[in-house]
Image: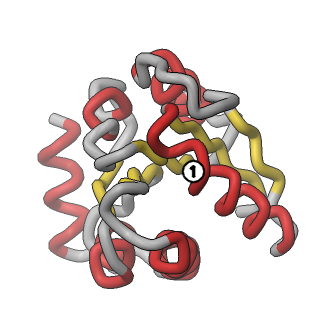
């Protein structure tokens, strides 16, 4: 997995820039779906664009950065998206290991930039455990 969709609203713009730079330095192709500044915007436009790109297979995973991370509600409206709100390394790891989440959402107002970078790295490195977790994902998709 070497490509990632990323989106933010104005409240997550600064961390999005940090994450984008970090990921590109690690060799990832990062497609930025906006926003492009700290000027207030409505997040659904940007989050939905990134989530659609993941659903359509253009990108295997995506990251949302907002003020709280609750912007994940937009992504989770799309069938095929499993987006977890992540606030530390453990929730990032479990998002992948237990939920096989193809998107995560981070809150710039909830964590430091270093914590956001660490959470993204952990999520990308983690592997889905399958087993009982697969059964639960199938029930989500019913």
Q: Is residue 77 left or right of residue 50?
A: left
Looking at the rendered image, the quarter that the N terminus falls into is bottom right
**Residue on which the image places disc 1:** 61
Q: Is residue 114 left or right of residue 17?
A: left
User: In the image, what residue occupies the spot 56% across and 24% down?
Assistant: 39
Nearest the camera: 130 or 42?
A: 42
Residue 132 image point, x, y percent:
16, 73
Q: Is residue 45 visible?
A: yes
Q: Quadrant of residue 43?
A: top left
Residue 129 image point, x, y percent:
34, 79
Q: Is residue 130 visible?
A: no
Q: Judge the density around disc 1: few (<14), some (14-19), many (≥20) Cα neighbours within 10 Å.
A: many
Residue 58 image point, x, y percent:
70, 34
Looking at the rendered image, the quarter that the C terminus falls into is top left
User: In the image, what residue occupies the spot 29% across and 55% down?
Assistant: 85
Spot the residue most to the front.
39
Nearest the camera: 56 or 42?
A: 42
Residue 69 image point, x, y percent:
32, 48
- Judge whether 2 appears above or below 114 on screen: above
- Judge whether 102 appears above or below 49 on screen: below
Q: Is residue 121 left or right of residue 92?
A: right
Q: Quadrant of residue 107?
A: bottom left
- Judge whether 134 appears above or below 129 on screen: above
Task: Give SS at disc 1.
Answer: strand
User: In the image, what residue occupies the spot 53% across and 37% down?
Assistant: 8
| Figure disc tally | 1
């Amino acid at each position: 997995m070497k490509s990632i969709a990323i989106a933010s609203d104005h409240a997550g713009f600064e961390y999005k820039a940090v994450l984008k730079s970090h990921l590109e330095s690690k060799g990832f192709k990062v497609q930025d779906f906006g926003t492009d500044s700290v000027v207030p915007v409505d997040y659904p436009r940007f989050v939905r664009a990134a989530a659609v790109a993941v659903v359509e297979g253009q990108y295997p995973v995506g990251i949302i950065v907002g003020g709280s991370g609750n912007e994940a509600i937009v992504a989770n409206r799309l069938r095929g998206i499993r987006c977890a709100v992540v606030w530390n390394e453990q929730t990032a790891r479990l998002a992948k290991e237990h939920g096989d989440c193809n998107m995560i959402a981070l809150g710039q107002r909830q964590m430091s930039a270093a914590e956001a970078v660490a959470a993204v790295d952990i999520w990308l490195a983690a592997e889905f455990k399958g087993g009982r977790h697969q059964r639960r994902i199938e029930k989500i998709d019913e």
